[in-house]
Amino acid sequence: MSDESRYDAGMRVRREVLGDAHVDRANARKTDFTEGFQDFITRYAWGEVWTGDGVDRPTRSMLTLAILAATGCEDEFAMHVRAARRNGLEPERIKEVLMHVAIYAGVPRANTAFGIANTILSEEQTE
């Protein structure tokens, strides 16, 4: 796949998973300093990894949630809770991912992630 088609595929998947509003905000905040990074994640995170055929999107979402929760990446975790819901993950599946995180990465990390996910899922119910 050419770099240009990887970028286009990445942007398509990024918009499908994160939503147009999120991607538009990220693009609007690009600066000369951050432009290369935005290009990098669009091409490789979204255009390579997320477009791969080996794992479906709900599974990718579960993996991403577990890794982000386990490493304490709270802002990215919140963004990917929303993405997981867009990818069809039910709250029960998100809960099971976080229970797994509690055992393998620690209760404090899972506790923080449960709080973030609960806020997002509660907001979703009131919309």
Image: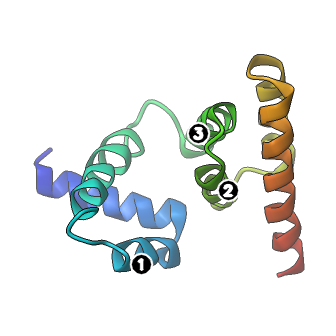
Q: Where is residue 51 in the image (x, y as percent from the top left)?
A: 37, 45
Residue 95 shows in this picture: no
Q: Which kind of residue does numbered mark 2 sit on? A: Ala
Which residue occupies 21% across, 51% down?
6
Residue in view at x 72 percent, y 50 percent: 89
Q: Front-most of 99 and 16?
A: 99
Residue 84 % position (x, y): 65, 53
Secondary element under disc 1, as helix, strand or loop, is helix
Q: Along the horizontal axis of the image, is 20 left or right of 74?
A: left
Task: Give the residue at mark 1.
Answer: 24
Q: Earlier in the sequence, mark 3 or mark 1?
A: 1
Q: Name the residue under label 2.
A: 78
For residue 83, the mark is none
Q: Which residue lies most toward the top here?
A: 104
Q: Position of residue 77 (x, y in %)?
A: 64, 49
Instruction: Point out the image quarter for the C terminus.
Output: bottom right
Separation of marks 2 and 1 at Cα, in angstroms: 18 Å
1 or 21: which is nearer to us?
21
Specify the amino acid type for callout 1: Asp
Task: Specify whether 108 is left or right of 76.
Answer: right
Q: Tell me if label 2 and label 3 are in contact, CB under 8 Å.
A: no
Label whose residue precedes the other's in the sequence (2 or 3) = 3
Q: Is mark 2 on a helix, strand or loop?
A: helix
Mark drawn on residue 64: 3
Q: How crowded is mark 3: few (under 14 residues within 10 Å), some or many (20 or more)?
A: some
Task: Say what amino acid the circle numbered 3 marks.
Answer: Thr
Residue 121 in sight: yes
* Label 2 environment density (alpha carbons within 10 Å; few <14, some 14–19, many ≥20): some
- How many C-alpha atoms fall within 10 Å of the one at disc 1: few (<14), some, or many (≥20)? few
Q: Residue at x 62, y 55 (%)?
A: 75
Which image quarter holds the N terminus?
A: top left
**Rounded to the nearest whole Å, what is the CA distance between mark 2 and mark 3?**
11 Å
